[in-house]
Image: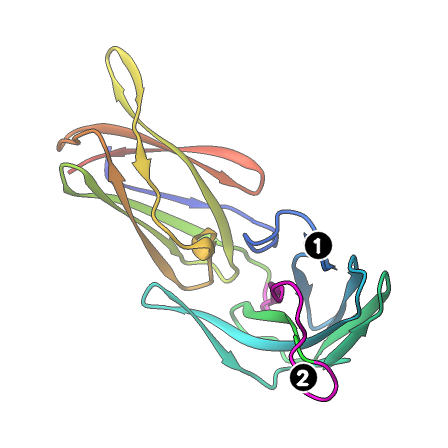
Amino acid sequence: MSAAVRAAILLPTLGLVFCAGPCLADAYLVEPVSLNLTIEAPQGLFRLASRDIEPIRLQVDVLSWTQEQGENRERPTADLVVSPRFVDLPPGGEQVVRVALRHAAARPEEQSYRVLFREIMKGPSGTPIEKRVALDYSIPLFVAPAAPGGPHLEWTLQRVDATTLLLEVGNRGNSHGKIALNSLVRKTEAGRTGLSIDLGKGTDWHYVLAGVTRTLRLHSRSPLSRGDSLLLTVEMDGRRVELPFTLQ
């Protein structure tokens, strides 16, 4: 069995790893946890709800989102319009924030953005407010490509040394993929043995944007040898998928 496994899987947009459901903390709630726009439906909205006993002031911005050399990059963009950009939530109050494409023109690949909700911890006069830590949320927004498609994920697992593996996930599709690593086991004639692995850091690892390859370094507490048969279990679109590899 080769070390590379390929799969084409349609994955709908899911929330950023900061929020598995509605983004909720002591201060305020934001939903939905992700937003999809299309040329046919170029507008969307977020609903904000205060859970605080004090007024909350928020600033809303949209940044373009790319993944370059294994890192997430966010840059200012004028592709979308936000209204209102500044939100004043009274205690227990609610507010709708609308987001719309400035120019509705489809591109070959899905476009990725992040909508940032940032709490302003200053009063009208600029005086700092003495209360809890400010709460910021980053929520993904995607604009569908011109032609239907989806992610096409290609997986490669390489042995670096006895305790280190490199997992590469390349997305050859025209839309993002979202994954969650579940477990890694070694297969032998006696059965399967679970490996204790360090999945590394980075809450954004779950997303693989269109045309991007992400690399994750895995550390095993058990020594690994060439020829070992491994089975990686991942979660994709709410389904558990097992991917077999043979270390070279």
Dot 1 surroundings within 10 Å: few (below 14), some, or many (20 or more)? few
Choose top left, top right, bottom left or bottom right for residue 131. Answer: bottom right
Q: Earlier in the sequence, mark 1 or mark 2?
A: 1
Q: Nearer the viewer, residue 15 or 187?
A: 15
| Kind of residue at disc 1 | Asp
Q: Residue furthest bottom?
A: 125
Residue 108 falls left or right of residue 243: right
Dot 1 falls on a residue whose secondary structure is loop
Query: In this rendering, which labeled residue sits more in front, label 1 or label 2?
Result: 2
Which corner quadrant of the image does residue 147 belong to? bottom right
The residue stretch that appears in magenta: 123-147
Residue situated in front as seen by the camera: 200 or 65: 200
Residue 22's x, y, as percent? 70, 52
Q: Nearer the viewer, residue 127 or 45?
A: 127
Q: Residues within 10 Å of mark 2 (few under 14, many from 20)?
A: few
**From the image, which quarter does the C terminus lie in?**
top left
For the N terminus, the image quarter is top left
**Residue identified by numbered label 2:** 127
Q: Which residue is mark 1?
A: 26
Residue at the spot 67% in from the left edge and 62% down from the top edge = 35
